[in-house]
Image: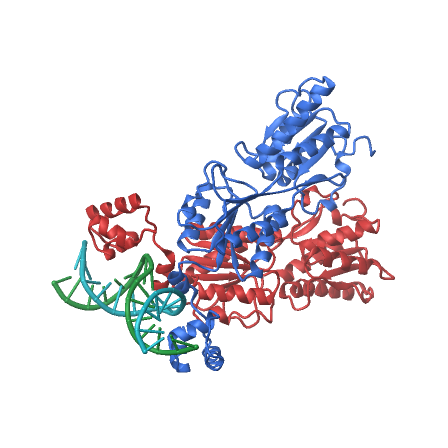
Chain colours: A blue, B red, C cyan, D green
Amino acid sequence: MTTIQDVARAAGVSPATVSRVFNGERVTAERAERVRRTAAELGYAPNRVARSLRKQQASVIGLIIPDIENPFFTALARGVEDTAQETNLSVVLCNSDEDVAKETRYLSIAAAEQMAGVIIAAASRNRTDLSLVRDRGMPVVAVDRLPRGADVDAVMVDNQHGGEEATAHLLAAGYRRVACIAGPEGASTSEERLAGYRSVMADHRRETGEPAPPAGYVQHGDFRVEGGRAAMAALLALPDPPDAVFVANNLMTVGALQALRDAGLEPPSTGVLSFGDVPWASLLRPSLSAVDLPAYDLGRTAAALLQERIAGSRIPARSVVLRTSLQRRESTRRGGGF
Amino acid sequence: MTTIQDVARAAGVSPATVSRVFNGERVTAERAERVRRTAAELGYAPNRVARSLRKQQASVIGLIIPDIENPFFTALARGVEDTAQETNLSVVLCNSDEDVAKETRYLSIAAAEQMAGVIIAAASRNRTDLSLVRDRGMPVVAVDRLPRGADVDAVMVDNQHGGEEATAHLLAAGYRRVACIAGPEGASTSEERLAGYRSVMADHRRETGEPAPPAGYVQHGDFRVEGGRAAMAALLALPDPPDAVFVANNLMTVGALQALRDAGLEPPSTGVLSFGDVPWASLLRPSLSAVDLPAYDLGRTAAALLQERIAGSRIPARSVVLRTSLQRRESTRRGGGF
DNA sequence: GTGAAAGCGCTAACAC
DNA sequence: GTGTTAGCGCTTTCAC
């Protein structure tokens, strides 16, 4: 490996000068040029490990997401990456697999590698422990999910509003027995979406005097395809099955659609509304109504906030909330369109 | 930050002893215990940057993939991760976005961070330059795509065989005007799949005396949804459009299906066979025939090979080829099933 | 089995 | 502007 010493010797200057050239500090043009040329000849590239050790910080940021196979998070990752690239930060992606232990390992790595900062979609609202990195003063931005009590910048989705809009749309379309497949208990995103559902349902009962939905109309899944399938199957097994369902994430919607089909049912006779776009939804017949999430912008915003912190901003922690937008398509068009 | 010095002082031993405790070298049980306890109390964790600088190697491997939004690569990533975890290696994922410049940046980072090794699905067969890392003696495993002339271990898919099987299946199903949507020119995976198509088509002509397919029956796309749509549209615009199409990757299949639908056509009247499973294909009606790729196993195998190299194996470079398997479903069931 | 000391490659403080 | 020097936190000789 070529070191800064080798270049210095070959160019007839001190190591400090070489360092300055590579860090954009003031060096006479002529010598700078000579250093650059010798460096190129020798194939020299600064050793980031040494640099990190010395500066006690790196030019890499960690992005920790809970499910790399969920397109929502990959779109988010692209947003982070695109923004980071603009200022020469590199992104390394870590998949916590919704597992707090794995997540903890990645957080320790981020700390130990002295990354410049971390963007995290936490695996758990209660058990994710950001102190590992926060104690070292490392900037952290929470995205999509904010661990309880974490004093960090956050970029969130207006889940409750999205849940309300979705439920209201199902009722307006004429569905009467509207169920909900929520995410894991304790997941903040799921709970907020569910709260939106509950609040609109309660308002509706108050206005119309209709009875409360039967027990079991709220099922909990695991945010994966299988969980959605099981939850839908459970709903269909009820004595009075729902005529529409609001599903709290995209992957569970896929499972729910499969269960529906297995039971010989199809939207929109049973209405289906997904929180979060199902990828390639455009191929589905009937097309799928969904609450669109700004996944890419979530990533961009998170990266921008992190960069401000890395640059040294010390203002109090901020939360940015991005709005969802409801896409009305065929799967909620009861009675063949209106 | 607590350092090894702090622990040593607090435990009344030398830094060397603390180091030995954390590296599993022989230390008297009693002292080892004391060190471990003080370390825990002080919240000490070894600084990986310093360790890397000293040992000149890290416990992190880089995984460079060309498209993080393609489920094939995310499944592969999981395979790599699961295997790496087993031996305490951590994986950082880099998305080259099919862009050789970005890829080069990530390779330099891998080199500069002195990662333990790299697994790469190369962005280009010709322009991907592994010398950046190979020159430093860093172990590299190519997966899915092998850059020309690269002397590294590789884990590949039997693309030609898959292409042959796919094409033969379309012909056996009774389709006669079979077209192919290939990937970018120069992509080895695409070229091999195309070669499989061509070889079976040529054999078939030889046996049956049927005329050669018209010009334009082989279209090139970009391995993304849009490319597939454009290619399919071009095929449909031909004077004598095909009655079946073999699409060389999963994302382009999505686009092709969209173009087909836009034209008022549906499989299986036009047969569609995808190379690589489309995620959530189970939701599609008609269900989609596909050449299944062992993405997860590709990842596992690549990680296993890399680990052998990291452990010091010096045997000559190996290539492992994994087989595909054809899934016959409804989209190629001409005339309503057979 | 253990400690002292050197040094991985780099940057920051200081003197010039 | 530039060189000299010290040291980031760790591992690894080499004595003992």
- For the N terminus of chain A, the quadrant is bottom left
Q: Position of residue B321 (x, y in %)?
A: 55, 60
The number of discs equals 0
Q: Position of residue B98 (x, y in %)?
A: 62, 62
Q: Quadrant of residue A250?
A: top right
Using the rendered image of the protein, determine whether residue B180 is visible from the camera's viewpoint: yes
Left or right: where B155 falls relative to A15 = right
Left or right: where C11 falls relative to B325 = left
Left or right: where B226 falls relative to B69 = right
Q: Residue at x 64, y 66 (%)?
A: B187
Task: Work out whether residue D15 or residue A156 is closer to the camera in this orientation and state it.
Answer: A156
Q: Quadrant of residue D1?
A: bottom left
Q: Is residue A266 above or below residue A90?
A: above
Using the rendered image of the protein, determine whether residue B173 is visible from the camera's viewpoint: no
Task: Work out whether residue A66 or residue A139 is closer to the camera in this orientation and state it.
Answer: A139
Q: Position of residue B21 (x, y in %)?
A: 27, 52
Task: Work out whether residue B216 or residue A321 is closer to the camera in this orientation and state it.
Answer: A321
Q: Residue at x 25, y 56 (%)?
A: B15
- For the C terminus of chain A, the quadrant is top right
Q: Position of residue B89 (x, y in %)?
A: 42, 54
Q: Residue furthest right?
A: B239
Q: Quadrant of residue B167?
A: bottom right
